[in-house]
């Protein structure tokens, strides 16, 4: 049987309310109190975020913009500005980093803080309240917080505290708090799982937690067990220390030092494409790109740029090429180039879907599905792939290098036979 564990934990969840809309309202106070929708401007794009005023009409995230316009014709529609949202996200993270013993940046607008043990010195709820007030004062952004015994309950509590509120759920209040809520409030229950459970007559967390976990395990495997545990307020997932040093990178050392700009840019695109795919596979977004060059004399130089959170390689590739162009000023032979994406947070492509071309998003999904099935190199953009003649040239150089090495070995062997004895 599962238990909640003996260690008493205190976990705070901070959630910035309708974050994109709130940032836009800071920039334009005329939007206050009005239905606002953030997303692409064409009918074929989707809703990325919306205000509470728009939600009253049935508008929700990921809804087709055409449907949102129909439900709320008076809504003010704004094309998203990820650079502005990223900047505000960094400001909030910096405030949390200054004051928190251990924190995790879960997404662009969510953070967890582990306050376990603080009650002995200060009081977890008092500290949480003061942190929230400080963030509001410094940024002007509304933020809701939930404080409880683990990540699941604190996240649900923050959701119930919205808009712009606070909620503490102590150990003895966990089940009474969760019981009347809809099963959709459990973070790991998506639309498909929700409909499966509803078809079984399960609507509330109370009903879900009183079902034998073996039944859910039989139905859904390990996920079923985990859902049952969450419904019972059990979650041992740790708060993972957030570090701006988290990164994903790749490097390429040339067989022969080069100044071939066309080839360098082509290779750079291919490198970016591969590690951007890894970002999406891990459901992460990057907000910093670094390019490295090592010259033939082994001098090494790097240049980086902070950007809006993204995992799209057509965006990342453009930044990498810009940095490479600024960095490569000496016109010397290059021995190595490298690319690194850092300042990673958890997130998916929807954060970038202010674009009016959903086909682009679908293209990424299709390409990633092919890679997931047949391997990372199964499909690539033409710009990052060598032509037939380039492959032949590379093969020819490899053969020439091998022949030269063989010749040098034979000459060394002859000298050894002549003078080495």
Image (spheres, helix red, strand yellow):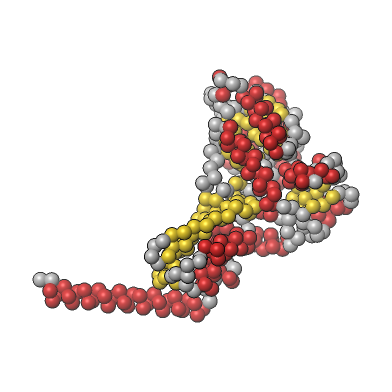
In the image, 246: left or right of 404? right
Q: What residue sits 67% from the left and 63% below the top? A: 363
Query: Looking at this view, is 222 or 43 the one in front?
Result: 43
Q: What residue sits 47% from the left and 72% below the top? A: 259
Residue 170 seen in the current view: yes
Quadrant assignment for the N terminus: top right
In the image, 420: left or right of 101? left
Q: What residue sits 57% from the left and 32% below the top? A: 100
Quadrant assignment for the C terminus: bottom left
Quarter holding residue 394: bottom left
Residue 202 seen in the current view: no
Total number of numbered discs in the rendering: 0
In the image, 328: left or right of 20? left
Residue furthest out toward the front: 330
The answer to whether residue 205 is above or below residue 323 is above
The answer to whether residue 368 is above or below residue 62 is below
Residue furthest out toward the right: 74
Residue 301 placement (x, y as % from top left): 46, 59
Quarter holding residue 322: bottom right
Q: What residue sits 51% from the left and 46% below the top? A: 245
Residue 57 placement (x, y as % from top left): 86, 44
Residue 46 placement (x, y as % from top left): 77, 54
Query: Looking at this view, is 206 or 416 the one in front?
Result: 416
The answer to whether residue 368 is above or below residue 97 is below
Residue furthest out toward the top: 120
Query: Looking at this view, is 159 or 227 the one in front?
Result: 159
């Amino acid at each position: 049987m599962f238990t909640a564990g003996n260690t008493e934990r205190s976990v705070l969840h901070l959630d910035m309310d309708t974050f994109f809309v709130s940032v836009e309202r800071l920039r334009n106070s005329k939007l206050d109190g009005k239905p606002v929708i953030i997303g692409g401007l064409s009918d074929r794009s989707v809703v990325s975020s919306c205000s509470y005023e728009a939600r009253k009409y049935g508008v929700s995230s990921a809804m087709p913009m055409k449907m949102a316009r129909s439900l709320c014709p008076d809504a003010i529609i704004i094309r998203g500005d990820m650079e502005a949202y990223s900047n505000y996200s960094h400001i909030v993270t910096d405030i949390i980093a200054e004051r928190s013993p251990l924190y995790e940046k879960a997404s662009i607008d969510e953070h967890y803080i582990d306050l376990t043990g603080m009650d002995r010195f200060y009081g977890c709820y008092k500290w949480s309240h003061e942190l929230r007030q400080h963030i509001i004062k410094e940024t002007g952004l509304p933020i809701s917080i939930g404080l409880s015994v683990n990540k699941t309950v604190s996240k649900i509590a923050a959701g119930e505290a919205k808009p712009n509120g606070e909620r503490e759920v102590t150990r003895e209040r966990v089940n009474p708090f969760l019981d009347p809520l809809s099963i959709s409030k459990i973070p790991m229950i998506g639309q498909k799982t929700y409909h499966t459970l509803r078809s079984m007559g399960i609507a509330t967390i109370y009903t879900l937690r009183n079902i034998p976990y073996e039944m859910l395990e039989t139905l859904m495997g390990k996920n079923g067990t985990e859902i049952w545990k969450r419904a019972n307020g059990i979650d041992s997932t740790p708060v993972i220390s957030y570090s701006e040093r988290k990164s994903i990178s790749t490097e390429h050392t040339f067989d022969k030092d080069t100044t071939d700009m066309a080839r360098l840019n082509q290779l750079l695109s291919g490198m970016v494409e591969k590690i951007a795919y890894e970002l999406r596979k891990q459901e992460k977004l990057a907000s910093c790109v670094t390019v490295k060059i090592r010259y033939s004399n082994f001098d090494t130089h790097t240049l980086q740029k902070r950007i809006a959170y993204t995992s799209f390689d057509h965006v990342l590739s453009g930044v990498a090429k810009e940095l490479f162009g600024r960095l490569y000023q000496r016109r010397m032979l290059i021995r190595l180039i490298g690319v690194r994406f850092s300042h990673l947070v958890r997130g998916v492509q929807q954060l970038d879907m202010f674009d009016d071309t959903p086909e682009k998003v679908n293209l990424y999904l299709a390409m990633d599905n092919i890679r997931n099935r047949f391997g990372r190199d199964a499909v690539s953009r033409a710009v990052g792939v060598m032509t037939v003649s380039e492959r032949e040239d590379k093969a020819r150089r490899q053969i020439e290098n091998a022949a030269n090495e063989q010749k040098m070995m034979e000459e060394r062997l002859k000298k050894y036979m002549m003078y080495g004895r």
